[in-house]
Amino acid sequence: MERREHLEWAKKRALEQTNSIMMWASFSSDMSKHDGLRDHIGFGLLPTIDLNNTGAVKKFIDGFN
């Protein structure tokens, strides 16, 4: 799967989850499965978001490119 396709797939699966913790778990797991996304610089920003805030997690995931 191409990088962009994998990223969109990971985002879609994450945003289907019912809570922010599960969203993040799904997204980070799926991202780690692709060589071109495993070390995405955006993961360094994780400490700046509240994982208990569903809106913030959705915005964070949706902002990945």
Image (spheres, grey):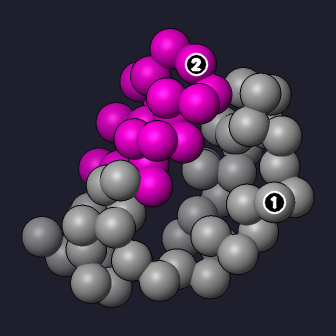
Residue 51 located left or right of residue 61: right
- Magenta residue check for 9: yes
* Residue 51: quadrant of the picture: top right
Residue at 25% from the left image edge and 74% from the top image edge = 34
Q: Quadrant of the N terminus?
A: bottom left
User: In the drawing, what numbered circle is on residue 47?
Assistant: 1
Q: Quadrant of the C terminus?
A: bottom right
The percent position of residue 15, horizontal first and vertical second, equals 48, 31
Where are the magenta residues, as a range?
8-28
Tag 1 or tag 2, which sits nearer the N-term? 2
**Disc 2 marks which residue?**
19
Residue at 19% from the left image edge and 76% from the top image edge = 2
Residue at 50% from the left image edge and 14% from the top image edge = 18
Q: Is residue 43 above or below residue 24?
A: below
Q: Mark 2: which secondary structure?
A: loop
The percent position of residue 27, horizontal first and vertical second, equals 44, 48
Q: Is residue 25 above or below residue 22?
A: below
Of all residues shown, which one is farthest toward the left? 1
What amino acid does circle 1 point to? Pro
Q: Nearer the viewer, mark 2 or mark 1?
A: 1
